[in-house]
Amino acid sequence: MRADAERSRRRILDAACEVFLERGPDAPLDAVVRRAGVGPGTLYRRFPDREALVRALVTDLLTRLAGAAEEAGRVEPDPYLALRRFVHAAADLRMGAAIVVLLEHLVVDEELVTARRGAVVAVEELLRAAREAGRLRADVGMGDLVLLCVRVSRPLPGALAALEADGSLVHRHLDLALDGLARDAGGPLGRPLGFEEVIAAAGRPGEQVGE
């Protein structure tokens, strides 16, 4: 893909992520066009309908999620700090909130399952390394991590959104929450929540991915 075409595609996907988070996946595509600063023809040449746009956006988010996990493990020698680095990177990409919103309107096929598998494997490796290093509670599953990110990273409603204007509040709240995942945090242990349980609860069929 030519560099200018890739930049245009990136603008559309980033704009779609923002618009769908703010207004839901049924938001008018005209709003995506305006946010991206492209013409309607540019959007529809790349994404002929809403389903194609949502599918491309989810696949892109999952691919970037896997990339963020792999990079965190590569550049951060401490396994627990690598996990923290990944969670903050995922928050910057607004993945936790966006994927949950978009999956509600998406038919799961093999392409999406493949992208999901790549993300799960990369994040599970971070969790495994942190557990084995004794830096993470034994009862933290990927499902717990995903839902924690979803709860913390959803946009604040109404006038409260002004508190998040500079993007720093979500990172503060993530740090507060992540401190509770540390091995030395104390408190009773529970049962890890697996990612496949989250997928099943969301009614999204596809390949089962174990812990």
Image (cartoon, helix red, strand yellow):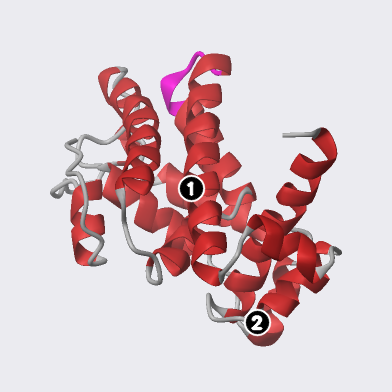
The amino acid marked with disc number 1 is Thr
Q: Amino acid at mark 2?
A: Pro
Residues at marks 2 and 1, CA–CA distance in whole angstroms: 21 Å
Q: Residues within 10 Å of mark 1 (few under 14, many from 20)?
A: some
Q: Is residue 179 above or below residue 164?
A: above
Q: Secondary structure at mark 1?
A: helix
Q: For the residues labelled 2 and 1, say whether their Cβ atoms are less than 8 Å apart.
A: no
Q: Residue 129: x and y, percent?
A: 33, 20
Quick check: 166 left or right of 95? right
Q: Quadrant of the N terminus?
A: top right
Of residues 197 and 208, the one drawn nearer to the viewer in this rendering: 208
Residue 28 is marked as 2
In the rendered structure, which segment of residues is drawn in magenta?
Answer: 76-80
Instruction: Give percent across and percent down for residue 77.
Output: 50, 13
Q: Is residue 51 left or right of residue 27?
A: left
Quadrant assignment, res 68? top right
Q: Is residue 7 magenta?
A: no
Local crowd at mark 2 within 10 Å, few (<14), some, or many (≥20)?
Answer: few
Q: Nearer the viewer, residue 200 or 81?
A: 200
Judge by depth and name the residue closer to the eye, 209 or 182: 209
